[in-house]
Image: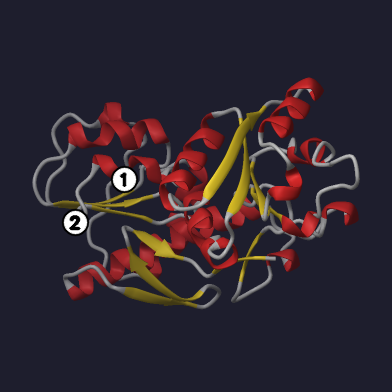
Amino acid sequence: LLTPIFYESFISEIENYPNIPKIEFIYSLAEIKSNIENSLIVGPITNSDLRELPRHLGNNTFILALSNDFSLMKKYADNEIIFIPNSPYLHVNKLNQYIENQRSIGVLYKQNDYGLKVFNHFQDKYPLHFIKSSSFGTRAIDLELSVNLIGNLNELDSVVIIDDSYSYKDLIGYLATDENTYPLDKIYLIDNFLEQRNVLENYYKPVNRTNFSTFDMSNSKEPHREFLFKKSSELTLIIADKIFSKKSLPKSINHPIFGYLSIESQMINYPIIFE
């Protein structure tokens, strides 16, 4: 169940994995006339397809999902799916090492599907933290109000911004008190690698963003999301090959770029850091 970018990557790499037997490409769920059975499924990519896929499944199937919307995990049993892509849900989990000893955290999340879903995951992940939160839009009056709603900035140990656009730049301008601006090095941005790490504006560089401990994304000139999409496709082939050769799901894999990757909690544990 592939879009063109994954199809291209799949075709160019598939010959390197001889343990993968018969392959059938499906471009739309509408093509499925009878339940899929006895199959390893790669994809789908879109949230809507992944939400609808269960009604097309028969017996003995396993899914290597290419969607990064981990909120759909609850629609599947633990033993029938793992999510391959690097995801903002994982980035939220990885924040723990930076905020676990903090008491009061402000969370500002974009007023869209991305912002709400990732914020809900944040709340579920950190139930013992005192969280002051607000959504934000794009108009100046909305940004100012959103910052005001999280209260006294001087009382916050850190501020987490969840944004898959560039609105965070305008939002940061309102993160100020009468005395001073909020320290940028106490802000954590979860942008799902939207912004190229090699072209960051100097003013915003102190903001903590996701990167990898095993290699530096700022050295990559290729669009980050496209690069990570292609690597997700590559990882599905590696895992699929091991499933067919070992007759079981591997607990971990070694990757030449990402390094050691464990498979746990139905996802790939990428070596994400904030810096």
| C-beta proximity under 8 Å, tags 1 and 2 | no
Residue at left offset 52%, top offset 47% = 5
| Sequence-earlier tag: 1 or 2 | 1
Image quadrant occupied by the C terminus:
bottom right
Q: Residue 111, located in which quarter of the rendered image?
A: top right
- Residue 155 sits above or below residue 147 on the image: below
Q: Nearer the viewer, residue 176 or 227?
A: 176
Residue occupied by mark 2 = 79
Image quadrant occupied by the N terminus:
top left
Location of residue 159 in the rendering, given as x and y in whole percent from the top left corner: 67, 49
Q: Nearer the viewer, residue 222 or 7?
A: 222
Q: Which mark is residue 193?
A: none
| Identity, as a three-letter code, of the amino acid under mark 1 | Met
| Identity, as a three-letter code, of the amino acid under mark 2 | Asn
Secondary-structure class at tag 1: helix
Label 1 CA crowd tier, 10 Å (few <14, some 14–19, many 20+): some
- The span from disc 1 to disc 2 (Cα, nearest Å) is 11 Å
Residue occupied by mark 1 = 73
